Image (cartoon, rainbow, N blue to C red):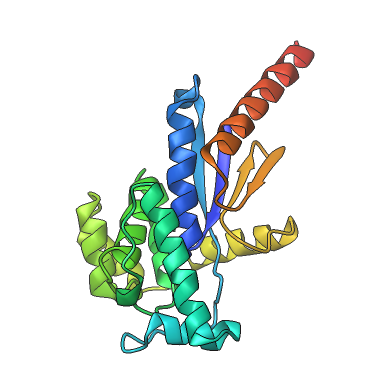
Amino acid sequence: MEVEIWSDVMCPFCYIGKRRFENALENFEYEDEVEITWRSFQLNPDMQTDPNANINDYLAEAKGWSLDQAQQMNQRVTSMAADEGLEYNMEQAVVANSYDAHRLVQFSKDRGKANEMEEALFKAYFTDGKNIADHQTLIGLAKDVGIDPTEAKSILESEKYANAVNHDIQLAQNINITGVPFFLFDRKFAVSGARETEVFLKALKQSWNAKLEDQQKAQ
């Protein structure tokens, strides 16, 4: 059974959704039969990387919010994250375009390290305040998850895996995905947003049962 997950590594709800989904998966009887495919999505493809920018100021301007609204939003997601055992340090978050980070994730798929790379990028952005557009930072993260840093450097200095990123973004548009995280179970059941763990577990069970019914009909 395949679960496709569209996310952006600078999306606070995506990290929370990842953890809630993982908690559901741990309680799913057929966990070993689930294949996870991480897919790229950019919430703001035009974002300009600016390590000197304040994330609250950026959000207020980008969303048309007041500074207080932006701060309250970040406080809310920080609290949500804490409930899932995640540490968010939003004041340290670096305003950065995620495109090259997505290319690195796509490369990581070929090395069987996509999930580890996603986790490392989320932690780097939300917990450690690292610039996830900086190539040296990305190379270091690749090394940390067991990917040859020389290979990662070569990928980042080229245009490789851009087509894979663009394919995922186009696929999201084709099936009307307008926000992330978005979880698609065997292309039959969908969960949009960082829903509760119970919602993900229900979707896993429904998808598994549907798969069994299809197999029985085919016999």
Residue 27 visible at all = yes
Q: Position of residue 119 (x, y in %)?
A: 35, 52
Determine whether, in the image, residue 144 is placed left or right of residue 191: left
Image quarter of residue 54: bottom left
Please state, as top left, top right, bottom left or bottom right, where the N terminus lies in the image: top right
Name which residue lies at 61% across and 25% down.
205
Name which residue lies at 67% across and 27% down.
206
Q: Is residue 78 above or below residue 204?
A: below
Name which residue lies at 22% across and 49% down.
146
Determine whether, in the image, residue 157 is placed left or right of residue 79: left
Determine whether, in the image, residue 86 is placed left or right of residue 76: left
Q: Position of residue 26 (x, y in %)?
A: 42, 29
Name which residue lies at 46% across and 48% down.
18
Q: Position of residue 71 (x, y in %)?
A: 44, 77
Q: Is residue 209 above or below residue 144?
A: above
Q: Is residue 78 above or below residue 59?
A: above
Question: Which is more toward the observer, 47 or 12?
Answer: 12
Please state, as top left, top right, bottom left or bottom right, where the C terminus lies in the image: top right
Residue 47 visible at all = no
Question: Which is more toward the observer, 210 or 102?
Answer: 210
Residue at the far right: name it: 217
